[in-house]
Amino acid sequence: MKTNEKGRIIKALAGFYYIDDGKTIHQCRARGKFRKDDIKPVVGDFVEFQSGSHDDGYLLKILERKNVLKRPPVANVDQALLVFSRKEPDFSTTLLDKFLLLIEYYDIEPIIVISKMDLESDDHIHQYIDEYRNAGYKVIETSSKQGKGIEEIKDIFKDKVTVITGQSGVGKSSLLNALDISLNLETNQISKALGRGKHTTRHVELLKMYDGYVGDTPGFSSLELEMEPTEAARAYHDFDELAYDCKFRGCLHDSEPHCAVKEAVEQGKISKERYEHYLIMLKELKEKKEKKYG
């Protein structure tokens, strides 16, 4: 009798699941019970399966997930490289703060990567870098042209599943090229390699890179906030730590008195700009909730 094996789904395409057990990639189909129970395996899932000796194996069971993103569908993500450029397009704290809220809500560690640091600008980028670092975020300054920050990024992939996302037009393809010289691909070729070409199926795939997995995630830029206002209030790691000192349990850090987050903003411990962005997102979530429940 065959014993069940364990592995991670690294690609799902046309009804087949490609499972890495650490030594071999197995091509498997899902048992009918998944469709019957409306369970959809996704890339990143840890699974139990039976490999086929001469034909396809079978996926038997999905193991417990640490997290799962809906769009794109990918599970058990450890960290996200949020790539934002210094210039062309301009660095956007509004968009970055929205990404941070979403990423931390899913229990994924955000790593802020600022590209095109070789471009001269009279911006306040170094002030922003200091503010995010003071808030406890890892910030890596990069330049694909100068090779700046590339070695630092290579070191963080080991034993992790990393997704790369962020502002559009920031040079994610140039960054991938700089990370893996063997790719040496044009932007559109990289898109095809990662399932994002015009004529290829848009799918998520985990690629082996520097002893970890890297996924480029199509569709992540839609940035739909789907959480309760109380969940948003605890999503940022520093807000969450301070929430224990708020007078009210379930404090939204909005109009409540004796709020530790608001006090931290007044004392300059939390960036006023990030707090204001949080209030805008909180308002959006409250309005969504009102519409949903009338």
Image (tube, helix red, strand yellow):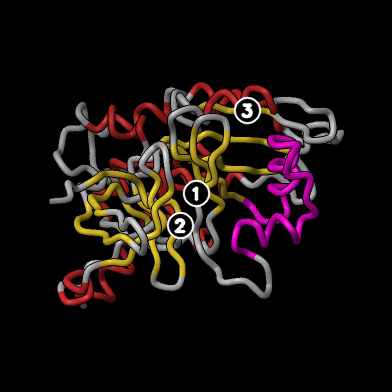
Q: Where's the C terminus, which quadrant? A: bottom left
Callout 2 crowding tier (Cα within 10 Å): few <14, some 14–19, many ≥20: many
Q: Nearer the viewer, residue 256 or 235?
A: 235
Magenta run includes residue 194? yes
Disc nearer the start of the sequence (2/1): 2
- The residue under the point 33% across, 68% down is 287
Q: Is residue 70 above or below residue 65?
A: below
Q: Amino acid at mark 1?
A: Leu
177 on left or right of 14: right
- The residue indicated by pointer 2 is 11
The answer to whether the residue labelled 2 contacts the one labelled 1, judged by CB atoms less than 8 Å apart, is yes
Q: Please, what is the three-letter code of the amino acid marked with disc 2?
A: Lys
Disc 3 marks a residue whose amino acid type is Ile
Can you name the residue that lies furthest to the right here?
120
Going by the image, does 148 lie left or right of 102? right
Q: Which residue is mark 3?
A: 140
Q: Residue drawn 78% across and 35% down? A: 144
Residue pictured at 44% horizontal, 51% vertical: 10
Is 24 placed left or right of 292 in the picture? Answer: right
- Magenta-drawn segment: 167-196
Q: Which residue is mark 1?
A: 206
Q: Position of residue 221 (x, y in %)?
A: 55, 60
Q: Position of residue 286 (x, y in %)?
A: 30, 62
Q: Secondary structure at mark 1?
A: strand
- Say if the magenta span includes residue 35: no
Of tags 2 and 3, the one toward the viewer is 2
| Distance of label 2 from label 3 (alpha carbons) | 29 Å
